[in-house]
Image (spheres, rainbow, N blue to C red):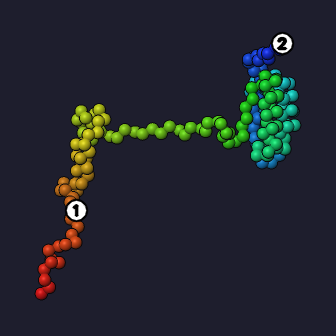
Amino acid sequence: MAHYPTEVVENLPPVAHARIVYVGPTAPHWEVHSDFGDGRLIDEFRTRAMARLLLLPPFDPQFRRNRERCVRDAERERILLEWDLGYPEEGEPAAAPPPVTVAPAPVASGTAADQTGDDTAADQTASSAAADQTADGTADVAPAPPSAESPEDDAPAG
């Protein structure tokens, strides 16, 4: 039985960084930016990437195939590669919405229950009763609606 050596994958740190940015619907569609690394290495990678992507917008069917070629090229050269397509990609988590902060309600009275933030039914009833009072301190009571069977309707017409 033949013994074939297994491929050893080395996990070496990247030697350069490149970000491929979609700049819009008019050609050239792409720009390659770099944050660190050898300038000559980045320029050579930029030349190869632009040859693959120059006239391809991201919605073109051939874009996916050429993008994978750019990714493999970057892996071979140990270039850390980012893509900025201007929209979230599939499988990439969408940007989380900013956190919403809610300010606590102002404390109306100085009871211990109010200071701890405990809302009880008595507190809710007291606040709704206070809301029903008018400016002169009297309770605002709505009159009861007339019932369908009032005693005036039962009296014979006379």
130 versus 22 height, above or below: below
Quadrant in which the C terminus appears: bottom left
Report the mark closest to the observer, 1 or 2.
2
Residue 79 percent coordinates (x, y): 78, 25
Q: Between 16 and 56, which is closer to the camera in this rendering?
A: 56
115 versus 141 height, above or below: above
Q: Which residue is labeled 2 in the image?
A: 1
Q: Amino acid at mark 1?
A: Ala
Q: Count residues near mark 1 (Cα–Cα under 10 Å), then give few for <14, some for 14-19, many for 20+.
A: few
Q: Residue furthest front?
A: 1
Residue 22 percent coordinates (x, y): 75, 41
Residue at 29%, 32% in the rendered image: 116
Q: Which residue is labeled 1 in the image?
A: 142
Residue at 80%, 48% in the rendered image: 26
Regarding residue 39, the answer to whether it shows in the image is no
Residue at 45%, 38% in the rendered image: 101
Task: Tell me which numbered mark, 1 or 2, is placed earlier along the sequence.
Answer: 2
Q: Count residues near mark 2 (Cα–Cα under 10 Å), then give few for <14, some for 14-19, many for 20+.
A: few
